[in-house]
Image (cartoon, rainbow, N blue to C red):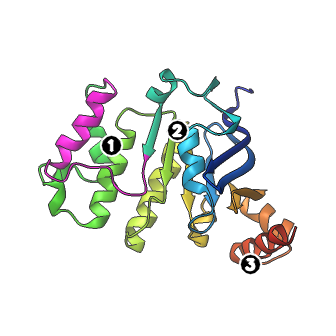
Amino acid sequence: MSEQVAVEVDSVTKEFGVIKALNGVTLRVRRGEIYGLLGPNGAGKTTLIRSIVGLIAPNSGTVTVLGRKLPNLDVLREVGYMTQQAALYPGLSVEENVSFFAAIYGVEGGVKDALEFVDLYTRRGSVVATLSGGMRQRCSLACALVHRPRLLLLDEPTVGVDPQLRVELWEQFRRMAADGTTIIVSSHVMDEAERCQRLGLIQYGRLLAEGSPSEVRSQAGTQNLEEAFLKLAGEKKES
């Protein structure tokens, strides 16, 4: 595995009974880039992310993260994972939630920085159950990055947040990537795909296309990513 590659997925298949959630997926994510997994609900995005973070074992194929083949508990200390549904304790405050995750990773002194990064430090004493959906998303992000991970996995991070907050979150993601953090973000929102450096279009548990947004549009011969996705998905289904 090249030192320039943060994540390597090689021919990964995952089945849940008769459902083949992943069907021979192969991709590579470079260090320090924002890689977008784009596809509708049920396409296989979350299963792929859970495979990369080591929460589920594939039926076949291999996953290598930061130079180490999974499963590997040591590599998880360098990985942050923000789930689609905020994994927070509603009865605790914002600061208590982030402090809990910092303690899990054995981190000291990172809570204030994480809360400032997501613009929640002034609300650090608020009980999570009283927060808006957008604030909960930001708190969940702070929990995922409090240990300054080298790889950050974000599963539908902007679902349910307002447009202004979405722009702010993406500005934060770009700053993190510029500082060397590799980010993999899943989404079914086509305009968010334009914010990624490279994309993997996924449907039916298979990778339909991969490349920069402009490369994907060119491959499909379309003017926008939504048309590109529909065309490529139709071709894959027919084949």
Observer-nearest residue: 59 or 134?
59
Which residue is rendered at x = 34% and y = 58% of the image? 137
The local crowd at label 1, few if under 14, some if 14 to 19, many if 20 or more residues have their Cα within 10 Å, is many
Q: Which percent across, then down, holds residue 43? A: 63, 62
Q: Element at badge 1?
A: helix
Which one is earlier in the sequence, the residue at label 2 or at label 3? 2
Q: Amino acid at mark 1?
A: Cys
Vertical comparison of 183 with 20: above or below: above
Q: Secondary structure at mark 3?
A: helix
The image quadrant of residue 166 is bottom left
Query: Of circles 2 and 1, which is in front?
Result: 2
Task: Say which residue label 1 marks.
Answer: 143
Verify CB contact (< 8 Å) between mark 2 and mark 1.
no
Confirm whether the magenta stretch covers residue 96: yes
Labels 2 and 1: the sequence-earlier one: 2
Q: Position of residue 115 (x, y in %)?
A: 27, 46
Q: Disc 2 to disc 1, how far (Cα)? A: 15 Å
- Spatial distance from mark 2 to mark 3, Cα to Cα? 31 Å
Instruction: Say if 95 sits above or below 43 in the image.
Output: above
Q: Amino acid at mark 3?
A: Glu
Residue 139 place in picture, x, y as percent: 29, 51
- Give, as a three-letter code, the residue at label 2: Val
Do the CB atoms of the residues marked 3 and 1 lie less than 8 Å apart?
no
Q: Which mark is residue 227?
A: 3
Residue 16 sits inside the magenta stretch: no
Q: Which quarter of the image is occupied by the C terminus? A: bottom right
Where residue 16 sits in the image (x, y, percent)?
Answer: 59, 51
Task: From the image, tell me which residue sits under label 2.
Answer: 53
Residues in magenta, as a range: 82-106
**Left or right: residue 230 compared with residue 218:** left
